[in-house]
């Protein structure tokens, strides 16, 4: 089983409560099973028997937001996010994925990448973004997720097949630089795409000076997976913006499920609760300007917390406030 | 449909009426999560592939009124109700030993009011304590309640078993921080205790509920003291030749009435083992760290006076850096892999005594464990200090306990029974801040003597159907 590769994590997390306060889903559902401890206990049950695995256990594994806040917080950095993805792989391999997951996975497999426009740089347009957001002078590539969404759902082989199609399309474009504003894609392509320089949009866009007070909502991927490559908060500060700390602490995930890439398509009611929680934490929900680096986060906040003013980092960098 | 299933469905409907359909669950994943807390025994059973006792229903009420409705339903059908906050208690206090209803308080998580005149906060008790501290810090204050389990536990959990944070020496245990509480009684009435803790209007009802571990009701709201964030907080560490020298130094600080915010003393084995592993201080002896906070001039004066007292004993001055390092890493001890874990058997023999008895308590427990269980390691530190004494956080660790869970449970309980009885004989009290729960309930009548009858009478009077957390704290099942 894939989860056997995470034996140390299972043993470390199953009886440990030290990061439960950072469980974005658990903080809105209040369920013990929606915490890293709860999921590690379930992983232990999976190791005992996959045949008799309760459907409730399976649902809890897929309900995780995979923000990796727990790994970031843990003094030993046990990879509970990796454990959850491994558990999903085992569940999918056993043919026990929940029906809604199967439906979304089928949709994600159905990709058709196309490259348009002209330029030396390729701009990837993810499913939460619009082609219009592409910077001038770039070719665009669109037509589906890069494979990260299927990977986090546990469909490893399908993820690899989709990624192969994406990589071929990139190769055909002739571009040696790829830019994306989607943090999940940035992380995934940085890890997997060879021969092409992968940049996050915040590091690529020619930014103009600005001013004013904004609250920056950290991206799970940029903070917990890619902090060595890109720091949007630093970029905003350098441009002259005054950053106010959002919420009460810098450790919680304020992305409403960005880590799981397509979370709102599977669990819209939980995504909505996470958005409402973010709104509750805003100092002045109707007047504050919140900035996110994640098109996913912007899209779900617009949908479920329309009282908030949410701007994408790229927009701020290019157009100002 | 069997009669039992039919009855369960009816009960499910009634609970859904009380708290909302979305907030009643018989979900297997949640039942699993609520069948294991931080007590070693359920961990052992899970590790060995067995199931622990599970609740039939988990309810998440949002208000005291909803809690009251649940109580009335439970009384009507005489179903056990076990309150559950963060579930991180080490004594089995939140385990649903007889099934029934788990009353999970985490949905009651609102900060209701911060009073900047009186420096108090009124808050619902299901709030995660780290979330509370963050919310208060954002307003420029602090609860000054910093237990190792701050991120794990709800505020209600600390109230229910009289928890303690690392700054207790100055700011007190949780019971010293409380102004008043709102409680839902076992029969479903909502009551409030008097609004201030100092009065002469009869016995202190607030204190009756603090430490009652969900056996006398559910604490749903509390008003706590808060404090300004101090201008300065400084630490200093010393290494002493042995634990007695260190204890003398620590006790002298307390007897001098200097107001340290924390004192912590590690015995020689723990200094050699954990202080080396976590802080990287590789020295033999007994490590003592202490701190002061507040106005910087006062901090410096008190710090110098405390250091002067320490220098009277056989010491090595480790300076401020090795004191600050302890503070910076104070929670690290409790993360894996620094915390003990399976397959090890381990337990915290949390005991408190006055200065006249505390060292005897330590040696009595240590000798008992060493002589009767030579395979066990015994380590200890002294965590929470008062004008009159301190708390001993003694621990035993067995690398390879019996594999069979029943045999292991008997073995484990035997260590507890012998060590705790040794502590009681020497004037120790079990315990200072972990609570009694399931683990120590059987020893309560011995600890209290005839006074335990009074506690039992209170329980019987307040909870006539014995629905609240039955089998805990030594009360009848």
Image (tube, coloured by chain):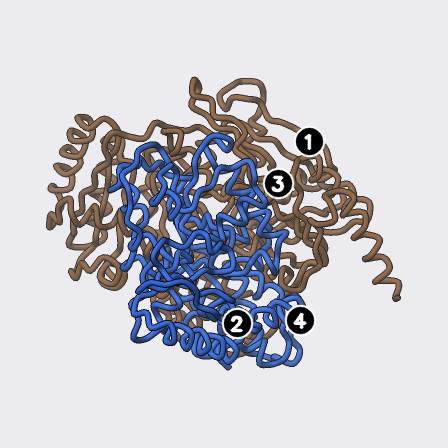
Chain colours: A blue, B brown
| Circle 4 residue | A54
- Residue sitting nearer the eye, A8 or A236: A236
> Nearer the viewer's eye, disc 2 or disc 1?
2
| Residue A238, image quadrant | top left
Instruction: Calculate the distance from the C-alpha at mark 4 to the C-alpha at mark 3.
Output: 42 Å
| Circle 3 residue | B455
Question: On the rendered structure, is A144 left or right of B391?
Answer: right
How busy is the neighbourhood of tag 1: few (under 14 within 10 Å), some, or many (20 plus)?
some
In this view of the protein, can residue A80 be seen by the observer?
no
In the rendered structure, are the residues bearing label 1 and label 4 in contact, judged by CB atoms less than 8 Å apart?
A: no
Identify the residue at image location x=15%, y=29%: B301
Q: Are marks 3 and 1 on the same chain?
A: yes
> Nearer the viewer's eye, disc 4 or disc 3?
4
- Which label's residue is closer to the chain start, 3 or 1? 1
Q: Quadrant of the N terminus of chain B?
A: bottom right
> Nearer the viewer's eye, disc 3 or disc 2?
2
Q: Are marks 4 and 3 on the same chain?
A: no
| Circle 2 residue | A112
Residue B56: give x, y in percent of width and height.
72, 58
Residue A276: give x, y in percent of width and height.
56, 42
Identify the residue at image location x=50%, y=52%: A24
* Parent chain of label 2: A
In this view of the protein, can residue B87 be seen by the observer?
yes
* Parent chain of label 1: B
């Amino acid at each position: 089983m894939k989860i056997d590769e995470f034996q140390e994590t299972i043993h470390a997390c199953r009886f440990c409560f030290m990061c439960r306060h950072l469980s974005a889903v658990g903080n809105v559902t209040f369920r013990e099973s929606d915490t890293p401890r709860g999921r590690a206990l379930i992983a232990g049950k999976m190791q005992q028997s996959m045949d008799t695995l309760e459907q409730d256990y399976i649902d809890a594994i897929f309900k995780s937001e995979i923000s990796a806040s727990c790994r970031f917080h843990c003094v030993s950095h046990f990879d509970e996010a990796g454990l959850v993805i491994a558990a999903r792989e085992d569940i999918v391999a056993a043919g026990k994925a929940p029906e809604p997951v199967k439906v979304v996975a089928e949709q994600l497999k159905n990709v058709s990448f196309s490259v348009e426009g002209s330029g030396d740089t390729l701009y990837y347009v993810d499913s939460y973004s619009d082609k219009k957001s592409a910077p001038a002078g770039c070719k665009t590539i669109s037509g589906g997720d890069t494979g990260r969404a299927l990977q986090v759902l546990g469909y490893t082989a399908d993820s690899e097949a989709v990624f192969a199609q994406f990589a071929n399309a990139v190769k055909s474009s002739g571009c040696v630089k790829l830019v994306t504003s989607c943090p999940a894609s940035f992380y995934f392509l940085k890890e997997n795409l060879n021969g092409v320089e992968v940049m996050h949009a915040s590091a690529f866009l020619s930014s103009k000076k600005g001013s004013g007070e904004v609250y920056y909502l950290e991206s799970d991927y940029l903070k917990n997976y890619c902090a060595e490559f890109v720091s949007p908060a630093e970029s905003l500060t350098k441009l002259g913006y005054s950053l106010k700390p959002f919420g009460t602490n810098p450790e919680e995930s304020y992305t409403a499920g960005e880590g799981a890439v397509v979370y709102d398509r599977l669990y819209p009611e939980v995504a909505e609760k996470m958005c409402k929680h973010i709104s509750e934490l805003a100092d002045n929900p109707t007047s504050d300007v919140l900035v996110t680096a994640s098109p996913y986060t912007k899209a779900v906040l617009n949908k479920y917390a329309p009282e908030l003013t949410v701007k994408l980092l790229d927009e701020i960098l290019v157009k100002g406030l | 449909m069997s009669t039992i299933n039919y009855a369960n469905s009816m009960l499910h409907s009634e609970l859904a009426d009380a708290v909302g359909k979305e907030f009643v669950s018989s979900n297997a994943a949640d039942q699993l999560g609520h069948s294991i807390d931080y007590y070693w025994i359920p961990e052992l059973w899970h590790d060995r592939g067995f199931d622990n006792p599970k609740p039939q229903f988990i309810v998440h009420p949002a208000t005291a009124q909803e809690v009251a409705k649940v109580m009335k339903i439970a009384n009507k059908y005489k179903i056990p109700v076990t309150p559950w906050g963060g579930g991180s208690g080490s004594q089995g206090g939140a385990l649903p030993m007889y099934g029934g209803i788990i009353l999970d308080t985490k949905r009651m998580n609102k900060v209701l009011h911060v009073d900047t005149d009186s420096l108090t906060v009124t808050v619902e008790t299901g709030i995660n304590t780290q979330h509370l501290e963050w919310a208060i810090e954002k307003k420029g204050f602090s609860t000054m309640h910093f237990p190792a389990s701050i991120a794990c536990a709800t505020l209600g959990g600390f109230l229910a078993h009289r928890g303690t944070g690392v700054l207790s020496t100055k700011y007190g245990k949780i019971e010293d921080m409380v102004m008043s509480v709102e409680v839902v009684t076992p029969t479903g009435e909502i009551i409030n205790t008097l609004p201030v803790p100092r009065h002469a209007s009869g016995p202190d009802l607030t204190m009756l509920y603090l430490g009652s571990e969900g056996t006398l009701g559910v604490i749903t709201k509390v008003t706590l003291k808060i404090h300004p964030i101090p201008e300065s907080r400084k630490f200093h560490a010393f290494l002493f030749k042995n634990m007695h020298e260190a204890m003398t130094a620590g006790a002298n600080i307390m007897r001098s009435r200097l107001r340290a915010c924390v004192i912590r003393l590690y015995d020689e084995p723990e200094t050699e083992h954990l202080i080396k592993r976590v802080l990287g201080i590789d020295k033999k002896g007994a490590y003592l760290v202490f701190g002061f906070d507040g106005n910087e001039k006062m901090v410096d004066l008190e710090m110098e006076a405390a250091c002067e007292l320490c220098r009277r004993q056989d010491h090595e001055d480790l300076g401020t850096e090795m004191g600050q390092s302890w503070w910076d890493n104070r929670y690290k001890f409790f993360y894996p892999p620094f915390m003990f874990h399976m397959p090890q058997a381990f337990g915290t023999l949390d005991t408190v005594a006055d200065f006249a008895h505390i060292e005897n308590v330590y040696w009595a427990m240590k000798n008992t464990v060493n002589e009767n269980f030579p395979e066990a390691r015994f380590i200890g530190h002294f965590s929470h200090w008062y004008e009159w004494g301190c708390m001993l956080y003694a621990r035993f660790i067995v690398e390879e306990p019996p594999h069979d869970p029943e045999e292991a449970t008997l073995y484990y309980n035997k260590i507890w029974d012998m060590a705790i009885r040794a502590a009681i004989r020497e004037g120790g009290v079990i315990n200072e801040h972990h609570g009694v729960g399931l683990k120590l309930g059987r020893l309560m009548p011995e600890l209290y003597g005839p006074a335990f009858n009074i506690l039992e009478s209170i329980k019987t009077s307040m909870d006539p159907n014995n629905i609240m957390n039955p089998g805990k704290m030594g009360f009848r099942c």
